[in-house]
């Protein structure tokens, strides 16, 4: 599953992490690859900002995802 980006929360503080994540699901789905309930999920941090024009310790990213079909015997 590919999900929309969350900007990675835009700010990631040492020892605290990401205090604000623009998602109803909280920091668990801030960014990266997760495997849950038998499903893969990938969330990118995106390239822009929202609300405040700042990013701290959350580099922008453009993800390239290659999907390969399994070989049929």
Image (tube, rainbow, N blue to C red):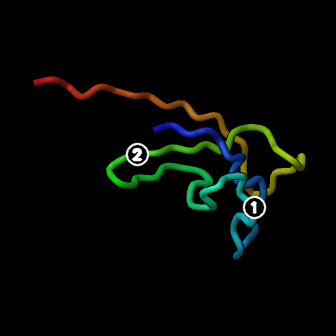
Q: Looking at the image, is 51 positioned above or below residue 13?
A: above
- Per the image, the residue denoted by label 2 is 40
Q: Where does residue 41 sit, x and y in percent of width and height?
A: 46, 45
For the residue carrying disc 1, how many other residues have a C-alpha within 10 Å: few (<14), some (14-19), or many (20+)?
some
Could you tell me which quadrant the N terminus lies in? top left
Residue visible at 64% across and 34% down in the picture: 62
Answer left or right for 14 relative to 67: right
Q: Where does residue 24 sit, x and y in percent of width and height?
A: 64, 55
Residue visible at 20% across and 25% down in the picture: 71
Q: Looking at the image, is 35 positioned above or below residue 42?
A: below
Q: Where does residue 49 sit, x and y in percent of width and height?
A: 81, 43
Q: Secondary structure at mark 2?
A: strand
Q: Secondary structure at mark 1?
A: loop
Q: Quadrant of residue 45 in the image? A: top right
Q: Quadrant of residue 21 in the image? A: bottom right
Who is closer to the viewer here, 62 or 27? 27
Residue sticking out furthest to the bottom: 15
- Per the image, the residue denoted by label 1 is 20
Residue visible at 37% across and 46% down in the picture: 39
Residue sticking out furthest to the left: 73
Residue visible at 74% across and 37% down in the picture: 47
Answer left or right for 71 relative to 31: left
């Amino acid at each position: 599953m590919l999900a929309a980006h969350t900007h990675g929360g835009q700010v990631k503080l040492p020892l605290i992490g990401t205090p604000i994540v623009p998602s109803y699901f909280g920091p668990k789905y801030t960014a990266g690859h997760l495997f849950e309930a038998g499903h893969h999920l990938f969330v990118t941090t995106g390239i822009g900002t929202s609300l405040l024009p700042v990013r701290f310790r959350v580099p922008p990213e453009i993800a390239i995802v290659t999907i390969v079909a399994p070989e049929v015997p």
